[in-house]
Amino acid sequence: MQISDFAVPDTPAARGALALATEYQSPAITAHAVRSWLWSEAFAVVDGIRDIDHELLYVAAVLHDIGTVTAYDNHSLSYEHAGGHVGIALTAGAGWPRERRLRVLDVIVRHNWPCVDPSMDAEGHLLETATALDISGARPDALPEPFLREVLEAHPRGALAAEFGTCVVDQAARKPDTAARRLVDGGVVAKLAANPLERL
């Protein structure tokens, strides 16, 4: 398994998602987003999940944390809902039909669920699984170590632990009824620091 096994979709929506992420997010958060896409695609392979909408998965992965940045933060909505609405706007401009645009919101929101049934939402399940690896260190042995190392070399973690920890604590304090509060109460800051990916 190699990065080259997974082609970035060559579409306006995919290019637009990466442009927004790069312009508005820090390098560490954007690298996390790209790693999350790569982990998602890799988990689809190792877990035998087929019939994936790869463009949808890429757009959702790249934008899944954009609701944390100042320009897109929402005073009442969770950061995942705010980011999902950014995805809807982007894909409307790319000409996606309404039903598919709403799927971007679904996948981004569900990445923060404790778990997602793949039979209900394969892309949401994959993004939840991928972000659980990249943030909390879940299932670190499920993917080949050479692939993990290649991805981390191409898209380094940098200051992710400190940046995301600070961000999610802020979100939880300002929006205590959102998933950010559950993440903080579940020890996400400590999990970030102890993530085995930090030591590869």
Image (cartoon, rainbow, N blue to C red):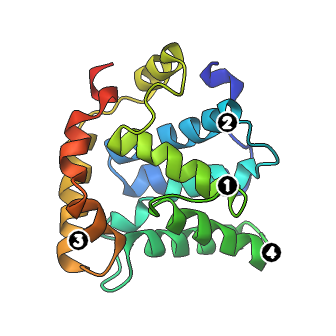
In this view, which residue lies farthest toward the bottom? 76
Q: Residues within 10 Å of mark 1 (few under 14, many from 20)?
A: few
Where does label 2 land, which residue?
47
Sequence-first tag of 4 and 3:
4
Sequence-first tag of 2 and 1:
2
Give how far apart the Cα atoms at labels 4 and 3 are.
Answer: 33 Å
Vertically, is 158 above or below 96?
Answer: above
Vertically, is 128 above or below 138?
Answer: below
**SS of the residue at dot 1?**
loop
Where does label 4 land, which residue?
97
Residue 107 lies left or right of residue 11; in this view the side is left
- Give x and y (percent) for residue 80: 44, 69
- Give x and y (percent) for residue 102: 67, 75
Observer-side mark, 3 or 1, equals 1
Check disc 2 and give the amino acid type. Answer: Asp
The N terminus - image quarter: top right
Where does label 3 land, which residue?
172
Observer-side mark, 1 or 4, equals 1
Check disc 3 and give the amino acid type. Answer: Ala
In this view, which residue lies farthest toward the top? 146
Mark 4 in CB contact with mark 3 (< 8 angstroms) = no
Q: Residue at x 33, y 64 (%)?
A: 69
Check disc 1 and give the amino acid type. Answer: Pro
**SS of the residue at dot 3?**
helix
Vertically, is 129 above or below 97?
Answer: above
- Give x and y (percent) for residue 150: 49, 18
Sequence-first tag of 2 and 4:
2
Residue 53 lies left or right of residue 66; in this view the side is right
